Image (cartoon, coloured by chain):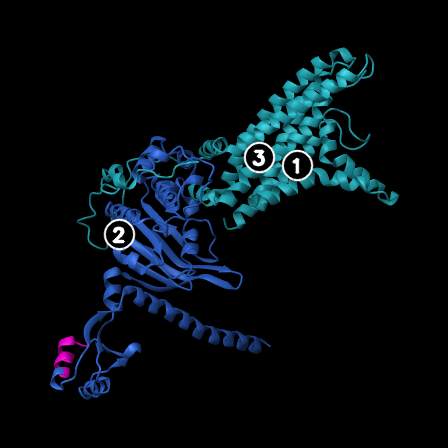
Chain colours: A blue, B cyan
Amino acid sequence: MIELEGLTKRYGEKVAVNNLTFTVRPGIVTGFLGPNGAGKSTTMRMMLGLDRPTAGDVRIDGRHYDRLKDPLRYIGALLDAKAMHGGRSAFNHLLCLAQSNGIPRGRVDEVLDTVGLTAVAKKKAKGFSLGMGQRLGIAGALLGDPRILMFDEPVNGLDPEGIHWIRNLMKSLAAQGRTVFVSSHLMSEMALTADHLVVIGQGRLLADTSMAEFIEQNSRSYVRIRSPQRERLLDVLHGAGITVVETGAGALEVDGGKPEHIGELAAQHQIVLHELSPQQASLEEAFMQLTAESVEYHAHTDTPEEQQAWGDGWKGN
Amino acid sequence: MSTPQPPMPQAAVPQPQPQLAQAPAPHWQSAPAGSYPTYTSPIPVVRTHLGHAIASEWTKIRSVRSTMWTLGVFVLLVVGIGLLAAAVVGSSAGETDLAGENPLSFGFFGLLLGSMCIMTLGVLTTASEYGTGMIRTTMTACPNRVRVLAAKAIVFFSVAFVVTFVSALLVAFADVALLDSSGVRDPSGSEWLKGTLGISLYLALLGLLSLVIGSIIRHSAGAITIMIGVVLAPLVIALFMFSSSLEKLREALFEYSIPNQLSVFYSNSLTESGPSGWDPLWIMLGVTAVAFAGACALLEKRDV
């Protein structure tokens, strides 16, 4: 279990991570979602004790990361695929990691086999493709057979076969009762793997919800209509008390409308329809909407804070 | 070069976790939300200590080619130039030309040039991890940052000392034998000690200082440049200090420049005053210790 409490990271004036509080639970895959630059990697680095938080706290099973005596047995992390010395062979890279945590040497061969790199174990990491580097990073994460696994954008650079593999891997790791925390900027990818979702934007927590709930709340369904008799159709729909949104390219959209109902209405008034289709807004759109709002929200909060600060200074004098 | 076409996916896809799957996961299926399952690994848990970090750093230093290159060139320079200097001097000198000279001192030139290699290796031991990003993996595996630096220091110092000592010893014996007929004196016991053990400890410490600077600067080329500057700059600046009002400073720069301190181990300093005997070793030890403490403080303070 990973617990974050009020986690904040400032770089000078810029707030990279702003007061994050959430819990990553075992037994499920938790997706950590946000657009580029939202603070995902910074948050993960703070979880691993690489960056010091400006404020707040992260605990791994109740302890700070740097208090862990054998950290690889607790957390396996893939931060970025190229966090290794290119001149070292895959085997030696894993061996030096294993030795630092007192993990038996045999485990190196095991994880190499798990990720399918046994054949290139003696080859230098420099010659590896991005996908192979990613696999080697995952091997490093699995080395200590840890309770918690953390992957930062694991599908980056993987081919479809590799993506399929890592999805199954994450699910099976979670099914064994481990905590799996995986970041991504692709909602579609998360929808396929994650059970729980933590969304951040501009370093702030935007959503902390189960995947199912997120889909239910955020997928907008609507009916798209196209007709050569657009004006008449609009009149008829308005007359029936239906709200219509005109979109570009001559199409109309009815939020939450039923195609049967609209079709019958059109037939009654003998209006020709070229299209009448139920639509579902993609999760990707829902995600974009969510994070776009965070930007707006941000712009609004900045002003009063500044005013207050100014006012305080004046009062002080 | 390499053929990055591993036969991997097919083998891995159907059973992604063959050896992890056998691990017991007893309660989780029946457990409802609220009480959470935890995975327990079959691998025995070990409390890690400095020894683990040292083993890890030993694997790191022996598994990259730059170690072999820098140390290989070092041995070549030290032994090659050491023997060449003695051979050239010995062949051109008459019966009494070298009377009273310390034959060990001809090892100086090789060691001075070789010090560049030791400094480079020292810098690379720490700074290259920042260049490659390996440092994040290292610090995740061992969150005790001071332990990581200490392990690096111990491993590097041992390697640098052993290689330097063996090379210096070899050159010392060879030079004494080569110059035997040229009328050089027999070095005393303390001269032997200083000219082999002393100078090896000094060079290994100079390398250790480079390692510490590498950890502070976090950039290989930058740290190497700084170290070369530290070695050469005082001497070069002193050379061009003509004004007599700067005479004192000029002398100090000469005396405490690293090449002059190196030559003190052969008791043929550029000047009569300044460090003598084992002084250079204590000076280097002090400087390195202070730099090490500074590097540790910075490591704790900065983000990786």
Question: Percent from the top left, x then y, of residue A313?
Answer: 56, 75
Residue B257 falls in which quadrant of the image? top right
**Where does label 3 land, which residue?**
B121
Q: Which-is-in-front pick, marks 1 and 3?
A: 3
Q: Chain of mark 1?
A: B
The amino acid pointed to by label 3 is Leu
Q: Is residue A10 above or below residue B266?
A: below
Kindly report the distance in space between the C-alpha atoms of the residues bearing marks 2 and 3: 46 Å
Magenta-colored span:
A257-266
Q: Is residue B212 left or right of residue B38?
A: right
The answer to whether tags 1 and 3 share a subunit is: yes
Local crowd size for mark 2, using a 10 Å CA cut-off: few (<14), some (14–19), many (≥20): many
**Along the line of sight, the residue nearer the viewer: A273 or B82:** A273
The answer to whether tags 1 and 2 share a subunit is: no
The residue shown at (58%, 25%) is B163
Q: Chain of mark 3?
A: B
Q: Chain of mark 2?
A: A
**Where does label 1 land, which residue?**
B286
Question: Percent from the top left, x then y, of residue A163?
Answer: 30, 49
The answer to whether tags 2 and 3 share a subunit is: no
